């Protein structure tokens, strides 16, 4: 025979932990998107500067400047990728903790994440956000490698 759940007052600590975990999930999601938008702006500025120096008419700079910009962009891209991965791991940890707490609740009133799993997007094959962010990062890496290759070629062929 199963025991009845403890009185509601005994669940107050678990509810507070659950609320904190959900707040951390929301904060990490907001932080991830803020970081993503800031990095998009930073990469756009780096790529425009690199492109202007490589292809701009009348733009004069030493031949190593576009190379330095491209290498800096690559370094920032790999740091960005690490930050996205770290944020994703934190997010998964917070979700797992909140779900473990939800499993202990006697009623479905606070099972936000567990109930959310039952909801599906309208497209059956949606790509997770973290994977999409990594795809965008790899596009930037490819652009920086192309710019670096062009800068090296231009420095060697047209000194």
Image (tube, helix red, strand yellow):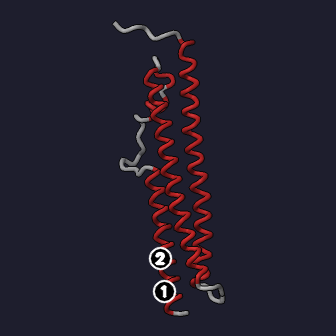
Q: Position of residue 129 (x, y in %)?
A: 47, 50
Q: Position of residue 110 (x, y in %)?
A: 51, 24
Q: Position of residue 4 (x, y in %)?
A: 43, 8
Mark closer to the observer (2, 1):
1
Would residue 132 be found to the left or right of residue 62 on screen?
Answer: left
Residue at 57% x, 18% y: name it.
12
Nearer-N-terminus badge (2/1): 2
* Most distant residue in the bottom direction: 158
Dot 2, crowdedness within 10 Å: few (<14), some or many (≥20)?
few
Residue at 57% x, 84% y: name it.
55
- The dot on residue 146 is 2
> On the rendered image, what quadrant is the N terminus found in?
top left
**Where does label 1 land, which residue?**
153
Using the image as rendered, state which of residue 125 and residue 153 is in the foreground: 153
Residue at 47% x, 20% y: name it.
105
Using the image as rendered, state which of residue 145 and residue 156 is in the foreground: 156
- The dot on residue 117 is none
Q: Secondary structure at mark 1?
A: helix
């Amino acid at each position: 025979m199963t025991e009845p759940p403890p009185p509601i007052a005994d669940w107050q600590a678990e509810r507070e932990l659950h609320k904190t975990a959900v707040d951390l999930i929301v904060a990490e999601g907001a932080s991830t998107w803020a970081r993503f938008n800031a990095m998009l702006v930073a990469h756009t500025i780096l790529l425009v500067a690199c492109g202007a120096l490589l292809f701009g008419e009348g733009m004069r700079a030493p031949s190593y400047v576009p190379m330095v910009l491209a290498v800096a962009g690559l370094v920032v891209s790999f740091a960005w990728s690490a930050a996205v991965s770290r944020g994703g791991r934190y997010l998964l940890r917070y979700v797992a903790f909140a779900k473990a707490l939800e499993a202990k609740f006697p009623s479905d009133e606070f099972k936000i994440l567990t109930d959310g799993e039952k909801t599906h997007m309208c497209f059956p094959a949606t790509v997770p956000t973290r994977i999409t962010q990594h795809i965008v990062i790899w596009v930037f890496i490819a652009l920086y490698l192309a710019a670096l290759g062009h800068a090296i070629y231009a420095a060697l062929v047209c000194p």
